[in-house]
Amino acid sequence: MVFPPLLQVAKELHSKGVKVTSVLGFATKAVVILEEEMKKYSHVLITTDDGSYGRKGYVSSIVNELSEDFTAVYACGAPGMLRYVNETFCSHPRAYISMESRMACGMGACYACVLHDAGEDQAVNKRVCEDGPVFETGTIVM
């Protein structure tokens, strides 16, 4: 499961009086984790791919229906979901995705974890291990 880092984000925001909405996606009910812990700090909406718990479908289906004007967006998870967040919130002033990548050296020397910059010069590389793992949406090519 890749969303536990967002639990700390929810805790911090909640402690500052920020209203937090968390949309969590899982394959099945059997793999749902940290729901009760997350509920202490945010309003939680859950999806499962098979519909065995929460709403059937993907996180994107709920996010598309939320009418809230988000002050900030934080995401981690499967590549497809991160691609969705990167594209949907590319012009949002405070939207971030946390990337996961195989990091052979972890120091930026091997370039095994390279992503391409979304700017005019896409030849510029960003390394997940050195420049990330968190990136502003719209700044990398996925």
Image (cartoon, rainbow, N blue to C red):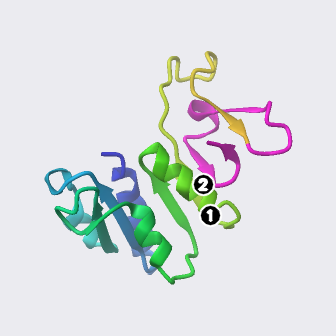
Give the amino acid type for the residue marked by disc 1 in the picture: Phe
Give the amino acid type for the residue marked by disc 2 in the picture: Asn
Which residue corresponds to mark 1?
89
Q: Is residue 12 visible?
A: no
Q: Is residue 135 on the magenta stretch?
A: yes
Foreground residue, 83 or 117? 83
Image point (35%, 59%), residue name: 7
Which residue in the rendered view is the most extreme toward the bottom?
67
Find residue 105 and report its horizontal and vertical position in percent: 52, 17
Image point (52%, 23%), residue name: 106
Q: CA distance from mark 1 to mark 2?
A: 6 Å
Foreground residue, 14 or 59? 59
| Quadrant of the rendering where the N terminus is positioned | top left
Image position of 128 with respect to 38: above or below? above
Find residue 123 and report its horizontal and vertical position in percent: 80, 30
Magenta-tinted stretch? 118-142
Image point (47%, 52%), residue name: 81
Q: Secondary structure at mark 1?
A: loop
Image position of 79 with respect to 125: above or below? below
Which residue corresponds to mark 2?
86
Q: Is residue 114 visible?
A: yes
Q: Secondary structure at mark 2?
A: helix
| Quadrant of the rendering where the C terminus is positioned | top right
Q: Residues within 10 Å of mark 2 (few under 14, many from 20)?
A: many
Find residue 48 and report its horizontal and vertical position in percent: 26, 59
Q: Is residue 64 on the magenta stretch?
A: no
Residue 80, numbered label: none
Q: Residues within 10 Å of mark 1 (few under 14, many from 20)?
A: some
Find residue 85 and report its horizontal and vertical position in percent: 55, 58
Marks 1 and 2 in Cβ contact (< 8 Å): yes
Foreground residue, 125 or 82? 82
